[in-house]
Image (cartoon, coloured by chain):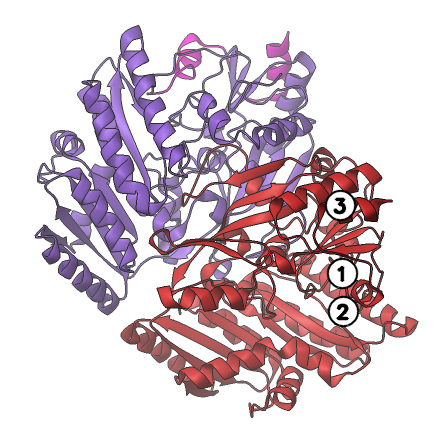
Chain colours: A purple, B red
Amino acid sequence: MFIDDLKAVVGKVSTNETILEHHSKTLTYHPPSAPDVVVFPKTEEELVEIVHVAKKYKKPIVPYGVGTSLEGQTIPYYGGIVVDFSEMNEIVAIRPEDFTVTVQPGVTRAQLNQALKKYGLFFPVDPGANATLGGMTATNASGTNAVKYGTMRQQVRKLRVILASGEVITAGADAAKTSAGYAVKDLFVGSEGTLGLLSEITLKLYGIEEYSAVAKLVFENIADASEAAFQILASGVKVTKIELLDAETIAIVNAQSQTDLTIAPSLLIEVSGGKEEVDLQLLTLKELAENWHCDLQLETNPLARAKLWQARHDAAMSLAAMNPGKQLMFTDVCVPLSKLSAAIVHARKVADEHGIQASILGHVGDGNFHVGLAIDQQNEEELATMHTINEKIVAFALELGGTCTGEHGIGIGKKRYLHQEHVSTITIMKGIKKLLDPDNLFSPGVLFDVE
Amino acid sequence: MFIDDLKAVVGKVSTNETILEHHSKTLTYHPPSAPDVVVFPKTEEELVEIVHVAKKYKKPIVPYGVGTSLEGQTIPYYGGIVVDFSEMNEIVAIRPEDFTVTVQPGVTRAQLNQALKKYGLFFPVDPGANATLGGMTATNASGTNAVKYGTMRQQVRKLRVILASGEVITAGADAAKTSAGYAVKDLFVGSEGTLGLLSEITLKLYGIEEYSAVAKLVFENIADASEAAFQILASGVKVTKIELLDAETIAIVNAQSQTDLTIAPSLLIEVSGGKEEVDLQLLTLKELAENWHCDLQLETNPLARAKLWQARHDAAMSLAAMNPGKQLMFTDVCVPLSKLSAAIVHARKVADEHGIQASILGHVGDGNFHVGLAIDQQNEEELATMHTINEKIVAFALELGGTCTGEHGIGIGKKRYLHQEHVSTITIMKGIKKLLDPDNLFSPGVLFDVE
């Protein structure tokens, strides 16, 4: 029996009902599905052994960080083995002199930044949730800071990966750049668990910003707010974050996070650097705000800023808390900057037409925004409406030259859109999957279905 | 006859001896090899037809930009068809509002920046030579500005590619980021012509820096200069460029570019941004320079700065001009920042031990440096010495966690090192090659030999 084989090679193996149930679902609308077994490896050697057992019994392997993914990536729809990385959470090496760190996949973002603080360093990618670096690598996560620092793919220097054969490979280099052959490292970043199991991740680090300020800009309607975001960026203001929150989102945030933000479409903009530099950027922002006859409030107190961003980051959780018994669904399109306003206005219109409560928020510096919906998974009608809304929003984004997912990934929720968006490259993707995972062991059903 | 077939589908086809000879070589030590025919397509449709003819007759296809590659990537060692992109040099669309541009592969870096100037925009990747964007994409080029802006892979948003089947695909998106499936776009960037023919490239653009200054720091020896580079970066000075030139390089540059730089190991550092910000960075630099008892000269005059960088960029050409009848060879290792000084000192020692004249220069902000040698291609002994030197420098860089090529690519010159560096991923690379180009039509012999 394959579970006995697993027990022989991994220290912690569980078939406890509560554990299986915990790994069967996420906070999102995707229906639950339990694994046969959950393993908690501590070492790379154990990962290798897990793959050998899975291969022997042709059992699926699905990696699990903390389960904050939004497109069902961690749900084992074909049963099998869930690999929970919570016990592979060691920070292997911090190299402040090289501005790099090597971590095991189970290390969380907050854990990493806590450890880096004393070196004056930080890791910028911040998807909101306190996700694991393994999960963030797997989905090519980004979030609020991406407008300045880029996405995970730009931070990952090197990976150790266990392939379907059980072989352990190293892709990438410790050096800042390389032109040695194909971008194999970049293939694994964003592969959503479908190509192998990560065992070590080497990341680029940055010096902590010496000074930051946040400007809150409040607008009369969402069209103005999104158009303003575009104009701010076109004016060359160097932002570290530029987040749009519509009135619905702010109401939710206020209710759950004890903030008292004005309930109206708003931009939260962080600028960072030397104080003079920051002041200069703020001056430009003020001039722009005056042109728009828009209210601008400044927040330079570090604690108040932290509270504000925490409230923003908790927006998804707040939406869940406001809707007990319901599940979350977030759209995730990303469009060229100049098309942002059109895309957001369209999304609002679509949600309103379907009479569904929707909150819009986004990392608008990248042209990326989300429509958040709380729905009842069991309610066929709600589910159908939600799919229709998503479909319309994605179709419009693709028309504008955008993508169906800026940062959440495809998972099982956006497979149909991957086909639409990459009609000409999906064959290549399937070929790569077959090349690296011929038995379809890793996260079957994620990204696309294998013939 | 396949050339007649080509003439039937492409407007300009040449078998003229001078043209063939021109496309048989580069400025480097790699031995020449002439193609059977050179084609000059103007359109994507012609590219597709060329691939069909090549497929029919099983003839190799080798793309050619302006022939400035340094590892023999454009030399058709198996004859066949060289595709010269000089007539596909149209800037298809500039979208200042989105900070993007779409170009045909034959557009050169200088041509693009000239066109962008009126929008206050520029494209930062600058490998020194006035290369084509197609060639730069193919080698994942970088150069002086990469320390601030990153390499080509980070600038390329979207590609149109003609595959070996003749099918035209679009990889990537116009949006700033995407998490939709595998990084197929990134696979083509840096594939050195081995996976397909590019027909269109969409690139990220940036606002022109409002103010820049250059500091020249002169050191007593190269160990101090490279250690200082590391310390400057570790101190958090935000540099746009940080270039190291040893005494030999400066002597060559002075002789060929009418500059009068002090002949000693030097760092040329550019800082950019608002004037106050720049002044602040310069202040830190001055303090550091005083600690090291090192001479610091400032250059804020834009023309003088431009002349200085031109001289630096012309270093390779200057080395060629100083050695008529000889060919160039550049090593290209890139190591973690903290290992830079050790790697450079080691390289100098290796060159000295072999009694060979070598000039060292590099983009030290990335840990990337070159040892430039001028050798006689026909002289077996010189060739052997050069290979020994390269081998030792690469072996040491790999030991330090570095890469054999930071920006020049593998071509035909570093194939043995690709095997050393990527012992565990080369099988994946070969699998990808086979998947995308089963008949080995595109640039055979480049990167690795196909079984």
Kind of residue at disc 3: Ala
Kind of residue at disc 2: Thr
Of residues B283 and B192, the one nearer the viewer is: B192
Instruction: Say if the magenta span includes residue B179.
Output: no
Mark number, residue B72 = 1
Residue B299 locus on image (x, y percent): 42, 85
> Given the image, what chain letter belongs to the residue carrying mark 3?
B
Q: Between marks 1 and 3, how big is the CA–CA gap?
A: 30 Å
Mark 1 in CB contact with mark 3 (< 8 angstroms): no
Residue B265 locus on image (x, y percent): 59, 83
Judge from the rendering whether residue B116 lies leftward or rightward of residue B330; answer left or right.
left
Q: What residue range appears in magenta? A: A1-27
Judge from the rendering whether residue B360 lies leftward or rightward of residue B378; answer left or right.
left
User: What secondary structure is found at the residue carrying circle 3?
Assistant: helix
Of residues A42 and A142, the one nearer the viewer is: A142
Instruction: Name the residue beneath numbered marker 3.
Output: B8
Residue A271 locus on image (x, y percent): 25, 57
User: What secondary structure is found at the residue carrying circle 1?
Assistant: loop
Mark 2 in CB contact with mark 3 (< 8 angstroms): no
Q: Mark 1 or mark 3: which comes first in sequence?
A: 3
Q: Quadrant of the C terminus of chain A?
A: top right
Q: Nearer the viewer, mark 2 or mark 3?
A: 3
Mark number, residue B28 = 2
Q: Determine if residue B434 is in view.
A: yes
Instruction: Say if the magenta span includes residue A22.
Output: yes
